[in-house]
Image (tube, helix red, strand yellow):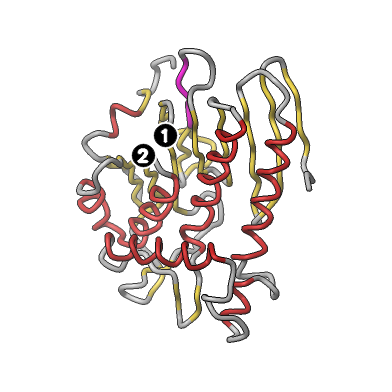
Amino acid sequence: MTTGATTHRQASTFHIEHCMGTVFTIDIRDPGCWDDAVRNVVRWLHRVDAVFSTYKAESHISRIRRGELTVADADPNVALILDLCRQVEDESDGYFSASWDGDLDPTGLVKGWAIERASKMLVSHGTDNHAVNGGGDVQLAGGSAPGEPWRVGIVDPLDRTRVLTVVRGCDIAVATSGTVERGAHIVDPVRAAPAVGLGSVTVVGPSLTRADGYATAAFAMGTDAPAWLESVPGYEALVVFDGGGTTDTSGFATREIPDGVPG
């Protein structure tokens, strides 16, 4: 089920897919025909949406919410995701949660996990250099070209026409939680109130599943986030405060291209 547009360029393939209420792109930089790989990834993304959507009445999550389906009888990935959510909840002292106001809602981690799995599917098809992007959260495999790292721009949530910096690297994931993609939507589960204090949090590391969950948790923490992010091994972050100004973890500078420096 390929419903978006696929473009074949010399030594690359680019596909756009609308799913999960956002836009996904599949950007393969290896030469060859990757139509089967793209089709499999597209099917996977729509399957994840059918299982985990909190908006579709017949999704497994919606049916579990209504008491019509148990986790044990649902798609096996539901139990897997809930276990991952519990791990991130423990790691973030409860600032990440798979529920709100009594309803099951693991969406703070699902998209990142789905994208990371999609990248692994592409690797299994034989492509080592690709990017899978869903609403600004991206898993990057290999490089953008031989010997060239990928580059990901981080947008200022207070001025969406401005790029704060550009993260570069090979085999990395970049996830951002904040107001740029979906507006104010993240809740602080510890204080049981809307998250305040930050404009956005961008987390960079090897796994988009973890980066997505950590970015969500950090945004919910508000101004306590920088200290916690510094303690997370293997991941670096850029924090934008809602009143302006930024801070980053000690290793983030090695991931970025400073303003005015060509990449």
**Point 49% across, 51% down: residue:** 113
Left or right: 123 as drawn, with respect to 174: right
Gap in Å between the C-alphas at discs 1 and 2? 6 Å
| Place of residue 220 in the rendered image (x, y in percent of width and height, measured from the top left) | 36, 62
Do callouts 1 and 2 mark residues in contact (Cβ within 8 Å)?
A: yes
| Place of residue 98 in the rendered image (x, y in percent of width and height, measured from the top left) | 44, 69
> Of the residues shown, which amino acid type is indicated by label 1?
Ile
Q: Pointer 2: residues within 10 angstroms few (<14), some, or many (20+)?
A: many
Quarter of the image holding residue 154? top left
| Place of residue 76 in the rendered image (x, y in percent of width and height, measured from the top left) | 54, 65
Magenta stretch: includes residue 2: no
Quarter of the image holding residue 46? bottom right
Front-most of 191 and 46? 46
Magenta stretch: includes residue 151: yes
Left or right: 74 as drawn, with respect to 206: right
Q: Pointer 1: residues within 10 angstroms few (<14), some, or many (20+)?
A: many
Front-most of 191 and 130? 130
Q: Which residue is mark 2?
A: 205
Front-most of 71 and 229? 71
Is residue 136 shown above or below 192?
Answer: above
Q: Which residue is mark 1?
A: 172
> Of the residues shown, which amino acid type is indicated by label 2?
Gly
Quadrant location of the C terminus in the rendered image: top left
Q: Looking at the image, is mark 1 or mark 2 earlier in the sequence?
A: 1
**Point 49% across, 30% down: residue:** 141
Task: Say which element carries label 2.
Answer: strand
| Place of residue 173 in the rendered image (x, y in percent of width and height, measured from the top left) | 44, 38
Q: Which residues are magenta?
A: 148-152
Is residue 154 shown above or below 56?
Answer: above
